[in-house]
Amino acid sequence: MSAMDCTHIRSLVSPYIDGELAAEKAAEVERHLESCEACRALVEDERRVSAAVRHHGERFRAPAHLKARVLSEVGRRSRGSGWSDLRMLGTGWNPVALAASLVLAVMLSSGATVAYLSRSAEESKAPLVQEVVSGQIRSLMADHLTDVASSDQHTVKPWFNGKLDFSPPVIDLTSEGFPLVGGRLDYLDHRQVAALVYRHRQHLINVFIWPEGGEEAPQVAAQQGYNVLYFKHGGMEYWAVSDLNSTDLKAFIAHLQKAVETPA
Amino acid sequence: MPQLDAAYNLARWLTRNDSDAQDVVQDAYLRAFKYFDSFEGENPTAWLLAIVRNACFAWMRRNRPAEEVVGSEPLDEDNVGNAEPLLGGGSRQLATDPETLLIEGRDRTQVNQLVAKLPAEFREVIVLREIEDMSYREIADIVGIPIGTVMSRLSRARKLLHDSWYRQQTKE
């Protein structure tokens, strides 16, 4: 093992443990680690530090009055001079409308990113990708994430009875690090679909499920902005969308696929 | 209000103070509302957090000039391969096994204190990566540095945390 190798590998430890290396680079790191104990120890040390901060690091939540304070200040200033550019946007000076237009800007540009990428990737799926992403954004922005909020699959599954003409598999993936948040009805591609919501750290994942024939292994439909993956199994089509990184979302899809393929 | 928790969390970690964080977030959002129509990038969340982050650093330069902030880099970021004494000291480490204690959840306060003590340019990448779970691309966009620098800062920040934790354990 040359020192040169170790220096090179050590510069890749952070992106390696963060899942930010391309597959072939990650494989190169793993090959080196198999035979180098010192570098293995470094990887473990860095992993532990990362895990400790993730586990213990405080995520401060914005105080409830901060939102009101910001909105009222936006409203106050927009009535004064110098803020005419805001009015030109057609939102008037209603602070709620201003906030909504910022939200809309966020939505539109995320959607555009996905549509662009999917055009080059897979033309035929593009409209559906767009709908799936819109579904995700709608659920987050409209504060309408779930109709039934429960981490218990035995509460969520029966809730769909009589509301849909199919029975979606509802799977708890808490032990895999993806607790169920709840479910709701949604509307995609001109039909009613089941939407299940999962959480992973700060990220929410929407899974849309509807009946569709055929079998397809998980595929990436879009990346960047939002990651979108889908697969077909046992007469159902599954689409997952999230702002979670693609490595973790792929892991989630793999767990979900394994669970639906294994009869309870 | 999009991303208000993420914005406040970042500002709270950078200013290390609730009321200052609120002031900074308010200023940043007013600026974002004013300029969002000129936004043309791909990631509006990163754009918004970049405004918050820049407002934090401007605030720190105004209010905490004594503190070392961006530009002054007392630590050699490129010195990635040289951290072996901190991280690789196998046998001594096993005796106290500091990292095991770290992840076992014994000392939340201590971890938070160590993160708070990091120099601002290391603190922000740790907070964005570990607490906000941002990708390197997003961190690069928010902080305004190349992805390679995100890597080396993050790597250095984790080594600083590891080192300070180790020093604390051996002191006790």
Image: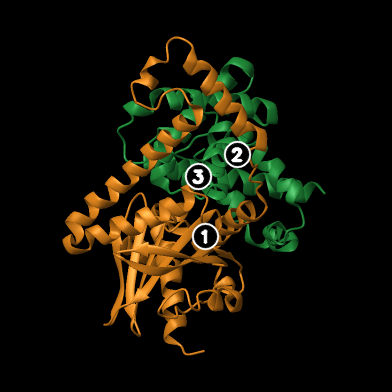
Chain colours: A orange, B green
Q: x, y percentage for residue A153?
A: 57, 76
Residue underneath mark 1:
A43
Chain for mark 1?
A: A
Q: x, y percentage for residue A122?
A: 19, 62
Does residue A162 appear left or right of residue A241 in this picture? right
Q: x, y percentage for residue A248?
A: 45, 63
Residue underneath mark 3:
B154
Report the front residue among A167 and A115: A167
User: Is residue B78 visible in the rendered structure shown here?
Assistant: yes
Q: Are marks 1 and 2 in contact (CB under 8 Å)?
A: no
Label 2 SS:
helix
The residue drawn where x is 28% and y is 47% is: A113
Q: x, y percentage for residue A262?
A: 46, 88
Between disc 1 and disc 2, the foreground one is 2
Label 1 SS:
helix
Report the front residue among B26 and A49: B26
Chain for mark 3?
A: B
Distance from disc 3 to disc 1, alpha carbons, whole Å, reads 14 Å
Identity, as a three-letter code, of the amino acid under mark 2: Asn
- Same subunit, labels 1 and 2: the answer reads no
Residue A88 lies, with reference to residue A64, above or below; the image says: above
Query: Residue B68's quadrant in the figure?
Result: top right
Identity, as a three-letter code, of the amino acid under mark 3: Leu
Identity, as a three-letter code, of the amino acid under mark 1: Val
The residue drawn where x is 55% and y is 41% is: B6
Residue situated furthest top in the rendering: A81
